[in-house]
Amino acid sequence: MDAIKSCFTTYGFAPIETPSFENSDTLMGKYGEEGDRLIFKILNSGDFLRKVDDALYTAKDSGKMTPKISEKALRYDLTVPFARYVVQHQNEITFPFKRYQIQPVWRADRPQKGRFREFFQCDADVVGSKSLWQEVELVQLYDAVFTKLNLNGVTIKMNNRKILSGIAEVIGAEDKLIDFTVALDKLDKIGEEGVKKEMREKEISEEAITKVQPLFEMTGTAKEQLDAIAALLASSQTGMQGVEELNFIVENVAALGLETAQLAIDVTLARGLNYYTGAIFEVSAPEGVSMGSIGGGGRYDDLTGIFGMKDVSGVGISFGLDRIYLVLEELNLFPETASANTKVLFINFGEKESLYALKAIKRLRAAGINAELYPDKAKMGKQMGYADKRDIKFSVLAGDNEIAAETFTLKNMKSGEQDVVDFKTLLIKLQ
Amino acid sequence: MDAIKSCFTTYGFAPIETPSFENSDTLMGKYGEEGDRLIFKILNSGDFLRKVDDALYTAKDSGKMTPKISEKALRYDLTVPFARYVVQHQNEITFPFKRYQIQPVWRADRPQKGRFREFFQCDADVVGSKSLWQEVELVQLYDAVFTKLNLNGVTIKMNNRKILSGIAEVIGAEDKLIDFTVALDKLDKIGEEGVKKEMREKEISEEAITKVQPLFEMTGTAKEQLDAIAALLASSQTGMQGVEELNFIVENVAALGLETAQLAIDVTLARGLNYYTGAIFEVSAPEGVSMGSIGGGGRYDDLTGIFGMKDVSGVGISFGLDRIYLVLEELNLFPETASANTKVLFINFGEKESLYALKAIKRLRAAGINAELYPDKAKMGKQMGYADKRDIKFSVLAGDNEIAAETFTLKNMKSGEQDVVDFKTLLIKLQ
């Protein structure tokens, strides 16, 4: 999180946090029926049943009772609270507004492996500008974060909603845009034949399916793929606009250069189609790591419309923290220094020795070294066992001899090596 | 929070986080009747009314209905979840267990100035050792944190529950220990006469009140005060043990030295008497700042008893984050560098100029400088206005001339001064 935050900051994004609670009204109806069911509701305080009228009470209907006994709910994602925040603070906010938010969200799902009732989301958005430079910068930002995390070789896939609309238009399936893109989006999972089968089931014509054949055969560089798509979409104004937008992004990202990520075009990418209106992003882990997407986002032209504030265009990306964590762990990329573990344990030999130890510990801590005194004069084995279990790398033994000579016996817990050193050497060795 | 966390780490405390939800059983009954009322309850998911039997339902009693329709609740503090955590993980935890926790808690209070329904608590505890070195280290830790925050001159006040018991014993008011200490604890607020009045109301004898007179007249160093208390408590074994414990702490803290805080004895300090069994801490803001305590804590001998795990002694301190924030703000102690604000805005003159700008911005960000390009080619006044409102210190103008000469016009937004510089100079000036 610290790595991600520091990148956000250099890109000019400021942190915001919103309360865990939202009014139920704000959340309900925003995530579909399934979403409504998964929102955690807070029971009203006090004598909450008093306000329920008798007729409703007698019906004993949980669904109808809920809004009467619960006015607040826990946030389900960061997007809706952010939209609420923008509308509520529109007169104080300086647009374009660049914010990031890293907070827990709650969902009343059945907990299972990789699915929690409470988990963190991490979003960065810019609202109030239609400039495509934002998309360029968000690609750079993904690259900066994954480079900082030493996660080299991620692929940032991009598409554009207008290209999908253009394809549907060109093949004469505009009325089936959603069916069509939902099927196309599954190419990764069910393959070309699977996608075609699903299209047929959704009554997309054979002629249309033949026309989209080039989409299954995209190869070459991003530029080459965009040229191929342009040829397919020449007759669609919307489609060509999408191509142009992607071209702008691809060219400028290339001119600026990426550190470790690569940018790719993926015309099958649909993600949240009903929401995104322009660019669509998705990040996949480096090859060889089997993990779904570790990030995604896109441009939306109506974030705040649900709250009555029209024409606020925005573009944002999110980071899949849980999955990024798993990938870093799998690739053994967590630096040892990331651990906030204690580096050295001073063995407790009694009162006088403890004071001697704490005087040294105070100086070590001032130099930023994580150091501890074992609190009790316990048996040596117990104290060493504590250092072992806590995975503390060094111990220091200082008894009468050391105190008299103003030295310390420093023991490497792994190799067992011991050295008698003065404080200066102790400090250097621990640094 | 970062300052506090880094001190915790050098002292060997490891972070833990517990879920926002606890089973209602775990929380209810732990904070008194008022606390039970202030705990936020989560409505069960699905058809929650189905499980309520008809007899209970017909009664329409909110209090009796609550446990039937709500199994989970939001944490009310960090202590009870920590105790639950220790009991649940007792076989995996290496004792003594040093943990810190900084997380929000929720209380169904009426919101008002300085009182929120959601706020952060910040605790550091060591459990599993009775060593008084912990108390010594916690005093040092308070000193380290407030020194790091540049909040010089805080007073760490200490007392000991055994001293309070000893006083009650000596004056023959053992049965009135709580009334007696509650009254004494108010000395700051209601003065000596107020305390005596309250003691009389609680039927504490005139003889007893005369005996405690020395408590109102404590002066001198911590050592001198402890000597005076020892004289008063000579006949109480418990009291003398308390004096001895405080003596140990005071002497060793003096031997180790504090950076900016001072340690004081305050025998009127009671805080959560029913909970603490040994040392009691309270931190007050520097003189001249009118603010209640900004931290407190103490030793408790039975943290986990409520969950059936006996004899786990612990000692902990907490930091009053909201109040510390207010004090730092009042004293203007937030360093400017703490702000994660953007340092330089590049003015957008069009496509070619933007690419030139973003190439420089990329290098500035790599050097850790927070930099932004205004996303749209808007009127100069609008772009400058954005920099102003966002309190961005510098702007960069780079048009045809600058691009041709590979330079940048750097403008100080406050003074209005402008300089034409090359990239190297730009970087140095912004650093």
Image (tube, coloured by chain):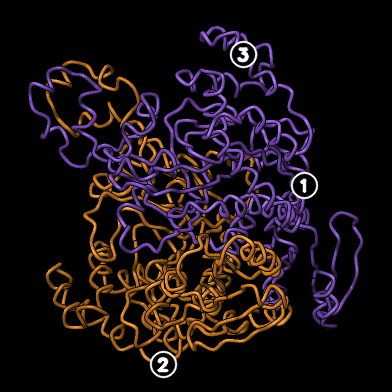
Chain colours: A purple, B orange
Front residue of B87/B226: it is: B87
Mark identifier at residue B285: none
Q: Chain of mark 2?
A: B
State which mark lies toward you, 1 or 3. 3
State which mark lies toward you, 2 or 1. 1
Q: Give percent across and percent down for residue A429.
A: 85, 71
The relative height of residue A90 versus residue B310 in the rendered view (above or below) is below
Using the numbered discs, state the Cα–Cα distance from disc 1 to disc 3 in whole angstroms: 37 Å
**Mark 3, residue position:** A209
Q: Could you tell me if the residues under marks 1 and 3 are in contact, i.e. CB atoms within 8 Å? A: no
**Mark 1, residue position:** A152
Residue sticking out furthest to the left: A54
The crowd level at tag 1 (other Cα within 10 Å; few <14, some 14-19, many 20+) is some
The crowd level at tag 2 (other Cα within 10 Å; few <14, some 14-19, many 20+) is few
Residue B313 visible somewhere in the drawing: yes
Q: Give percent across and percent down for residue A244.
A: 60, 42
SS of the residue at dot 3? Answer: helix
State which mark lies toward you, 3 or 2. 3
Using the numbered discs, state the Cα–Cα distance from disc 3 to disc 2 in whole angstroms: 92 Å
Using the numbered discs, state the Cα–Cα distance from disc 2 to disc 1 in whole angstroms: 64 Å
Q: Locate residue B237: give its quadrant.
A: bottom left
Front residue of B97/A308: it is: A308
Left or right relative to B424: residue B201: left
Residue depicted at 29% across the width and 22% down the height: B48
**Same chain check for tags 1 and 3:** yes
The relative height of residue B285 versus residue A312 in the rendered view (above or below) is below
**Mark 2, residue position:** B220
Residue sticking out furthest to the bottom: B220
